[in-house]
Image: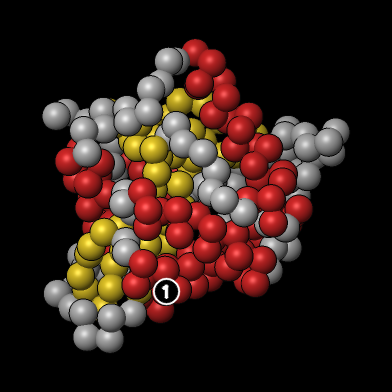
């Protein structure tokens, strides 16, 4: 479900990167929700509101604080969260309260499950083996500083320090697919074409215009 505002320019010295903590929750939730409702293909098509995504993101960000596997970028002067990468163990439970999210999210979960279930059926994955890049975003006004690039590098370093063997993610947009494959060396595993996916016998994503597919990507670390 990766999504972000990307740029190749280097981050500036006034931006700091650190592991997500409980003090970052409010800022991380707002950053993620703003990014996804602005530019993620499925979120936009389904008309998920900022308020609905705030609630959804808060469940995962609170869980991420407990997991200790996510990273944030902050303005070193104001302390504002300007970028966030929410990550988790690939083999993990959904957060408490997931039953309270809007039904608008159900088709997204259906597509992501279809994409990952084939991989899980063909590979025995134990807890602690694969690091899941779940949701990423950078505030639009901070585009052009390479923040998501640095967040990804910090996340990979954190994953390796926890002895994960590799990282996996679902890239839902063309930019994230291009950047993770061509810049960070992730390998495409499988795809689901938006026009072909059926949720309750309905092609719910057939009208997505700016992207053809959702792509499962993976990268193994050279520890």
Q: Residue at x 21, y 79 (%)?
A: 76
Q: Residue at x 72, y 46 (%)?
A: 106
Question: In which quadrant of the rendered view does residue 217 lie?
Answer: top left
Q: Classify 3 as above or below 48.
A: above
Tell me where residue 223 appears, x and y as whole percent.
Answer: 14, 29
**Disc 1 on helix, strand or loop?**
helix
Image location (x, y in percent) of residue 204: 78, 45
Q: How is the image coloured?
A: secondary structure
- Please name the residue that numbered disc 1 is placed on: 27
The picture places residue 210, in percent across and down from the top left corner, at: 61, 53
Q: Is residue 73 above or below residue 197?
A: below
Direction right: furthest residue: 201
Q: Residue at x 61, y 33 (%)?
A: 113
| Residue 211: image location, x then y, percent | 59, 47
What is the total number of numbered labels drawn onto the structure image?
1
Q: Residue at x 32, y 40 (%)?
A: 182
Is residue 5 something one can see in this rendering? no
Q: Residue 128 versus residue 156: which sits nearer the camera?
A: 128
């Amino acid at each position: 479900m990766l999504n972000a505002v990307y740029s190749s320019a280097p981050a500036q010295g006034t931006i700091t990167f650190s592991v997500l903590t409980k003090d970052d929750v409010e800022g991380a939730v707002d950053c993620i929700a703003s990014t996804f409702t602005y530019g993620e293909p499925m979120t936009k098509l389904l008309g998920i509101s900022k308020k609905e995504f705030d609630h959804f993101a808060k469940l995962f960000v609170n869980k991420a604080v407990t997991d200790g596997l996510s990273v944030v970028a902050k303005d070193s002067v104001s302390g504002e969260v300007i970028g966030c990468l929410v990550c988790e163990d690939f083999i993990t439970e959904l957060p408490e309260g997931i039953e309270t999210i809007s039904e608008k999210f159900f088709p997204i979960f259906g597509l992501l499950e279809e994409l990952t279930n084939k991989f899980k059926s063909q590979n025995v994955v134990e807890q602690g083996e694969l690091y899941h890049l779940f949701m990423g975003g950078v505030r639009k006004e901070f585009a052009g500083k390479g923040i998501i690039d640095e967040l990804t590098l910090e996340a990979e370093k954190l994953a390796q320090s926890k002895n994960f063997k590799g990282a996996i993610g679902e890239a839902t947009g063309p930019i994230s697919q291009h950047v993770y494959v061509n810049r960070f060396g992730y390998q495409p595993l499988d795809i689901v074409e938006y026009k072909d996916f059926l949720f309750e016998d309905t092609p719910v994503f057939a009208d997505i215009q700016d992207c053809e597919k959702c792509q499962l990507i993976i990268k193994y670390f050279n520890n």
